[in-house]
Every structure is written in C-alpha cells, then in structure tokens.
Amino acid sequence: METYTCYHGTHLSAAQSILSEHHFWASESDKEWAGHGIYFFLDDDPRTAYNHAFKWAKYIRRAENPAVLKATISIDADTILDLRDLGHREYFEKIRLRLFKEAKKRAADHSILLAPNMLGRMELDCFAINYICTHETPPLSAVISEVNINFYRSIGYPSSLYPNSTILCLRDESLITNIAQT
C-alpha cells in the first residue's frame, strides 16, 4: 500500500462543497493529462505541491478566492500507472501505438475518418490511459505523471517542454483517507 499526501487547487466555494459533501467531481474531458479522474499535485516537498495547487486554482482556474485541499490517499501499488517509471512509460507507449494502429486500420477498412480521439496528442494520451486503467486486472486506481503547466500563460509566457509539476489522477475517490482545507 502506498500513501500519498496530495494537494487539490480549486475555488473556495468548490472546496467547501467537497468538504461538506465528501465528494469530488472527476475531470472527464477528452484532453485530460492522465485520463479521467480527480487531479492532485504531489511532490517530495509538500510546499511545492501546495504552491502548484494554489497557482492552478488562481492562474488556470482563475479563482477569485483560491483554496487548496490537502488529501491523504492510500493506494495499492499494483493499481498505479506511474509514468515516471520507464517500464510504465514503455507499456503506455506500446498500448497507445497499438490503439492508434487499430483505429487507423478500422477507419481505412470502413472508408471513414479517423476518430477525433486518435488525432490529437492529448486526446490520444487520455484515451490510451483510460483504456489501460479499465482493461488491467484489477483496474488501475491512479495515474502519476510529470507534466508542464504554464501557470503564467496569461502574460504570454511561453510553455516549456520540460515538466514542472507532478500530478496524481485518482480514479477511485474511496481511496482518499483524509481531506482538509489548508
């Protein structure tokens, strides 16, 4: 069992709702970095994770009253796709490529356009991660990935190719053992 202390940045009203209802709303767009789920920041230094969650709420979500929730999450290590690990990244890439080739063949065989979730980098990543998480036995509960988040894009600051944040996407909310506003 792995235990993580993570931080979730949001609007103050959403944080209050999460605390009172003990429920998060999962992110489920086709362009999620690490598939569908509840997103948290983590880091070896908790201050860094907290700061990233705060900047997410303030600069990306544009919260007038940003809030950060601190969560303790306990997950069976065998149910984590950790894309910081070379073996996990190679497995992800193998499945992603297979899914793309299968979709491309189906489209060619039926003289149809390739599905939108196969055309964009983020869409294909999200689709492949969701596929992996649901087709593993047992299903995967979380994905950990390093990403670059441009917290200052509103001032025209160029994005970098190099990661500046680590995220944990939780697919099973019942694994949150504690949550509090910081």
Image (cartoon, rainbow, N blue to C red):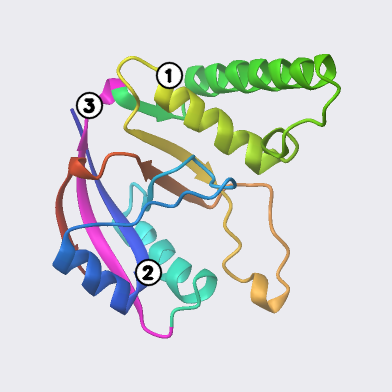
Image location of residue 84, percent across then percent down: 47, 32
What amino acid type should be assigned to the residue bearing mark 1? His
Front position among marks 1 and 2: 1
- What are the residue bounds of the magenta stretch? 64-78
**Among the 4 quarters of the image, the one containing residue 155:** bottom right
First along the sequence among labels 1 and 2: 2
> How far apart are the two marked residues, 1 and 3, measured between alpha carbons?
17 Å
Q: Which residue is mark 1?
A: 135
Q: Which residue is mark 3?
A: 76
Q: Is residue 121 or residue 155 the one in the foreground?
A: 121
- Measuring 69% from the left and 59% from the top, which residue is drawn there? 159
Q: Which residue is mark 2?
A: 10
Provide the secondary structure element on which disc 1 rests. helix
Left or right: where 182 falls relative to 82: left
Left or right: where 91 falls relative to 38: right
Q: Is residue 117 or residue 41 the one in the foreground?
A: 117
